[in-house]
Image (cartoon, grey):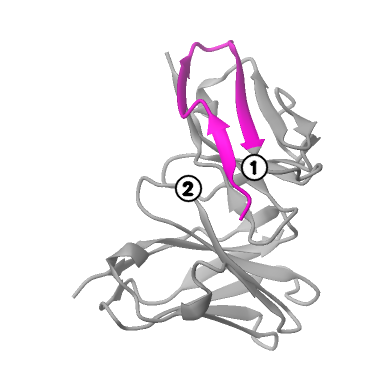
Amino acid sequence: QVQLQESGPGLVKPSETLSLTCTVSTGSIRGYYWTWIRQPAGKGLEWIGRIHSSGGTNYNPSLKSRVTMSVDTSKSQFSLKLNSVTAADTAVYYCARDAGSFGYWGQGTLVTVSS
Amino acid sequence: DIQMTQSPSSLSASVGDRVTITCQASQDIRKYLNWYQQRPGKAPKLLIYDASNLQTGVPSRFSGRGSGTDFTVTISGLQPEDIATYYCQQYDYLPWTFGQGTRVEIK
């Protein structure tokens, strides 16, 4: 059973960079795509992008100019950076394993953008 | 981007009722459609993948069908634990996109 856990600051100031890490345990990070999805309070799900364990990435064009993803296979971790954040980026951020379908998810972490 | 449109946005049904949620894609996505259940305060859970395949451990009262642009998920005998929001998601074309969700409540 693959387990994922998001970590990172819960509060980010406007115009700064949101940084989150997802740690994969009880399973290998190698050979898979790993994805980030977010959900503003009371709203639907938005796919942010994904990274393969080899480092290849696909980003949502709506966020592409502000997103960077990276992976550290030695630590079984992958990360998300979203720069120039505004209040509209306030959301619960989930990491998940991406096989086109998302069968394994982290519990989610709330990130609030506020001064 | 592929637009995914779910209907209805919400529904209220009695325990034991048959409930059907529809998802329509803005273009042909073949069979590449998944369904998720999200209970309040929880991460989404994969119910059905590739339009009609039940994820391991999901009760058999859930079923999915469809291909191309029109898809449905049906709950045959609504249970109290099925109270949740349901999302469809396509993965034929990047970026992956979700429907807006259907909230299911007990009458």
Quarter of the rendering containing residue B48: top right
Q: Residues within 10 Å of mark 2 (few under 14, many from 20)?
A: few
The three-letter amino acid code for the residue at tag 2 is: Lys
Query: Which dot marks residue B71?
Result: none
How far apart are the alpha carbons under marks 1 and 2? Answer: 29 Å
Q: Tell me where the magenta segment starts and ends, as one range.
A: B1-24
Who comes first in sequence, dot 1 or dot 2?
1
* Residue on which disc 1 sits: B26
Query: Which dot marks residue B42?
Result: 2
SS assignment for the magenta stretch, majority? strand
User: Is residue A18 found left or right of B13 in the rendered image?
Assistant: left
Q: Is residue B10 magenta?
A: yes
The chain containing the residue under callout 2 comes to: B
The chain containing the residue under callout 1 comes to: B
The three-letter amino acid code for the residue at tag 1 is: Ser
From the viewer's side, name the closer residue of A33 and A66: A66
State how many labels appear. 2
Percent position (x, y) of residue B6? 56, 33
Percent position (x, y) of residue B37? 57, 39
A64 over B58 or under it: above or below: below
Q: Is residue A88 magenta?
A: no
Which residue is pictured at 56% across the width and 20% down the height? Answer: B79
Percent position (x, y) of residue A41? 35, 51
B67 over A5 or under it: above or below: above
Q: Secondary structure at mark 1?
A: loop
